């Protein structure tokens, strides 16, 4: 199984410079996958850190050809709920080309409102609550 942890292009949310913190949720979940599914092929595509635009993100997805894409965060790194519309838009863009790749999301806000998030965002196939 090929798992892509995706940080979509959304720039830096801080006002004091170009801050690019790691996505702690991705690191933790990748570590769990490596332990529980050592055969998994895991990749992180951090468009913010790599300064990739939407087209470059889509090419990265084409190149890796994941079986599932995860977008989620421990929101301290992205400005709390402000990332949700970015995840929703990114999921929509991805589904235009890759209808068969499941998109999973998670994080503090999403976990608290997973039913609403899935209802509001048909491009999210799964939401993780309680990670």
Image (cartoon, helix red, strand yellow):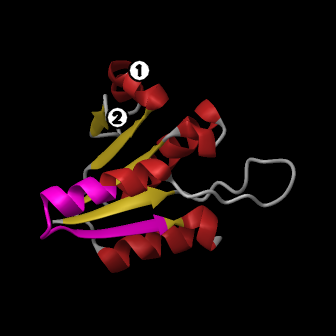
**Residue found 22% across the figure and 63% down from its top:** 34
Q: Residue at x 56, y 65 (%)?
A: 47
How far apart in space, not on screen, are marks 1 and 2 (Cα)? 18 Å
Secondary structure under the numbered disc 2 in the rendered image: loop
The numbered mark, 1 or 2, whose residue comes first in the sequence reads 1
Start and end of the magenta stretch?
30-45
Q: Is residue 100 visible?
A: no
Q: Could one spot residue 57 in this view of the protein?
A: yes
x%, y% of residue 15? Answer: 85, 48
Residue 122 - label: 2
| Drawn side of residue 60 relative to residue 102, left or right | right
Q: Quadrant of the N terminus?
A: bottom left
**Observer-nearest of 3 and 9:** 3
Q: Nearer the viewer, residue 104 or 90?
A: 104
| Residue 66 percent coordinates (x, y) | 27, 67
The residue furthest right is 16
In the foreground, 16 or 126? 16
36 inside magenta stretch = yes
Q: Is residue 7 left or right of residue 91?
A: right
């Amino acid at each position: 199984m090929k798992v892509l942890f995706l940080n979509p292009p959304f720039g830096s949310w801080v006002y004091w410079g170009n801050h690019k913190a790691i996505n702690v949720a991705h690191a933790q979940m990748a570590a769990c996958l490596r332990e529980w599914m050592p055969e998994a092929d895991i990749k992180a595509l951090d468009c913010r850190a790599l300064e990739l635009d939407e087209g470059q993100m889509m090419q990265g997805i084409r190149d890796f050809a994941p079986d599932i894409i995860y977008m989620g965060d421990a929101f301290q790194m992205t400005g709390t709920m402000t990332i949700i519309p970015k995840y929703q838009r990114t999921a929509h863009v991805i589904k235009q080309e890759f209808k068969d790749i499941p998109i999973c999301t998670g994080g503090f806000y999403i976990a608290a409102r997973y039913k609403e998030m899935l209802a509001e965002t048909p491009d999210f196939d799964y939401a993780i609550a309680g990670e």
